[in-house]
Image (cartoon, rainbow, N blue to C red):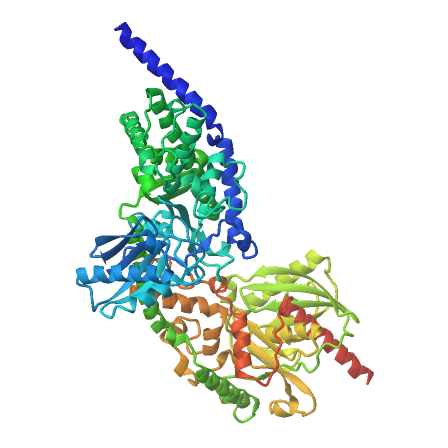
Amino acid sequence: MFAVHLMAFYFTKMKEDQIKKVDRFLYHMRLSDETLLDIMTRFQAEMQKGLGKDTNPTASVKMLPTFVRAIPDGSENGEFLSLDLGGSKFRVLKVQVSEEGKQNVQMESQFYPTPNEIIRGPGSELFEYVADCLADFMRTKGLTHKKLPLGLTFSFPCAQTKLEEGVLLSWTKKFKARGVQDTDVVSRLTQAIKKHKDIDVDILALVNDTVGTMMTCAYDDPYCEVGVILGTGTNACYMEDMSNIDLVEGDEGRMCINTEWGAFGDDGALEDIRTEFDRDLDFGSLNPGKQLFEKMISGLYLGELVRLVLLKMAKAGLLFGGKKSSTLLTKGKIETRHVALMEKYKEGLANTREILTDLGLEPSEADCIAVQHVCTIISFRSANLCAAALAAILTRLRENKKLARLRTTVGVDGTLYKIHPQYPKRLHKVVRRLVPNCDVRFLLSESGSTKGAAMVTAVASRVQAQRKQIDRVLSLLRLTPEQLVRVRDKMRAELEYGLKKDTHPQATVKMLPTYVCGMPDGTEKGKFLALDLGGTNFRVLLVKIRSGRRSVRMYNKIFAIPLEIMQGTGEELFDHIVQCIADFLDYMGLKGAQLPLGFTFSFPCRQTSIDKGALIEWTKGFKATDCEGEDVVDMLREAIKRRNEFDLDIVAVVNDTVGTMMTCAHEDPNCEIGLIAGTGSNMCYMEELRNIELVEGDQGKMCINTEWGGFGDNGCIDDIQTQYDKEVDEGSLNPGKQRYEKMTSGMYLGEIVRQILIDLTKQGLLFRGQISERLRTRGIFETKFLSQIESFSWILQETVKELAPRCDVTFMLSEDGSGKGAALITAVAKRLQQAQKEN
């Protein structure tokens, strides 16, 4: 019994001694949490560098856009082919995806070898070999003469500009096929496949094995938004916000980024972490100075790192009695599978003895314990480094989502992760320690990245089919150049009808004279009050104009117009306006001041002078009673009298469009057109008086308020009206009126989109066919959402250029709004009045 205890003590002491010996020898390979957090910070900086347009060219972590924009939603179905090229074996796979009420995937696959003469020979032979294997598979499975979509898993860094294209940046791992770098691998493979006349394949997607892994796992777990490969090589991908990807246009939604993290450190960022063994391994590799992070982590290199350490320890007399075998001196003789066997629980020491004996060595018990610990330190360092970079990605995801705590899933694949008995739990433990505010689930990709390529293809196929159906719906809204020319010509005819006395009553475009006959000349000066009414907000402004320098200073306050006031009585509306004026004057300390006032009133009015305007009809949701047909200036004056607190000199009533033109004309004397593209839509311009039959005189110009929102109310543009326009019109406050405005203005565009979304959802093309209660709510989709998704201004400018090629037009944004324009019109009117008096 004593002897047993003595032996146990001896073995324990020997084990401790050997472990301490190895720990001292490999001190630099043991990384503290502090060091890992520092590496995590460095990797975050490299990610940011890779995402930036200006910094990407010099970034070691390339952060390649994959153009994978969506993960599986469960509605995918059909038959797909997949190829997986990138590891020690090449795989062809047929995947049958069916929905049938539940997600179901059936697979048949075949592995083919990748001989060295193929992967290191001419590139043309590599692609011909892949095409031959694909053709063999399809013939064996009876898939010839059948058109099938294919996804290609290509596990090397590629620059992509679309999903079905990829230019090889560099070979990694053991691949070195000549003449492939800087060429499109999809195009090369397509050409090779075309030589087989009995197979018909359409390559829809090129994906990295990492992306394939993420997509495979995302099919089973929708929380999966990160993919990691820990096999022959190592890499990671994740779903990044489009707004952060400078290399790709657009800023809505997300896209999968292939980090290519294997090259982390190629710029020297990890020199303090690398050891002499890392440098020796790199020097003897196929790509010295490249993929330095990968060479510290992946399965292709861990066995060789162990061999280099054992060799140096033997040379130093710390192992095998200082003896070396020819096998130990031979590169590549210790593989990662050996490392995994040596670290196996219980059988590890026996496995170690067997492997060392096969290497021609005669290990002692102490040697076996030491070698096993070398394996542990090297594989543990691998897991630690991987954990630090993965923690950086998880932190970025959490920060992108602005969450205090993130719940997510990481899909993992690769032989190192699968065969090494300790690796997964080491990785998981360190990741959770580095990012305690992330709840991470690790999901092993049982079916490999090849299934993922098929899933990417299935998603691409689903999106492609949906896009075709959606395009058919949206084609109704796409106007051809010929249609636009017809709309232009009809608008021109309606403008002419509105200007003529005989046809004016029937014209839909009313061409209202504004009695604004002059533009700012720079001599205007003084203090003016301006009102701006045209939407749900009402603005009161004090405008100070200084002559000579075209200097304008403004003070304003915005007041809400409640719905019950907008749709109450006219008296209530104008009393509310006067209350707002009183509050503003009080706020500015101007109570009792006699100021000239300009009133921007953004509704159709028939004017007989600059300070008289009878409301023709309400638009934009206003319905106040007893106003249509009445002079709005008189109604304002009456309300001021009822209040009996102050008196104002109302000089001009103007449309917001006219105010906009005057504001811009104050900056640019060439401005003679005003355009409003807001809640409503309208345009004004300076017309020759001789063409305006509704007003006496034929000398000079006058601004015409077109009120073009009513264009088409006579049915002249029914041919371009869609079912969605009709639905919006029928649900509006004024059916059959302002049809052009309802197709162009901010008040209605969001509602048109909502109607389209409902229709597409009913057809099963969006949101899995489920219409939410929120989407059923009228007005829920605001026009501001369109502005966030799409830019309109360049479309307007380009179309104007195409339809009026002989006009050199400059578009000028009215920064200060139409309220300033009302003050300027008032100032011009006062100047002209003064000139008349003097004459």
The picture places residue 27, in percent across and down from the top left corner, at: 48, 27
User: Which residue appears at 50% of the width and 54% of the height?
Assistant: 244
Relative to residue 215, is residue 524 drawn left or right? right
Q: Position of residue 710 (x, y in %)?
A: 49, 80
- Residue nearest the observer in this picture, 216 or 485: 216
Q: Nearer the viewer, residue 63 or 334?
A: 334
Figure check: 616 above or below 620: below
Q: Is residue 157 left or right of residue 833?
A: left
Q: Is residue 533 visible?
A: yes
**Quarter of the figure with residue 126:** bottom left
Q: Position of residue 20 (x, y in %)?
A: 43, 21
Q: How many marks?
A: 0
Question: Is 166 left or right of 3, judged from the image as shown?
Answer: right
Q: Which quarter shows the C terminus?
A: bottom right
Q: Quarter of the image containing the N terminus? A: top left
| 667 is higher (above) or lower (below) than 295 | below
Q: Quadrant of residue 695?
A: bottom right
Coordinates of residue 340 in the picture (x, y in percent): 32, 34
Name the foreground residue: 423 vs 174. 174
Taking the view exactly as shown, the residue that stands out farthest to the bottom is 502
Q: Quadrant of residue 825?
A: bottom right
Asked if residue 761 can be seen in this view, the reply is: no
What residue appears at the point 52 percent right and 49 percent down from the top-left corner? 48
* Of the pair 728 and 9, the residue shown nearer to us: 9
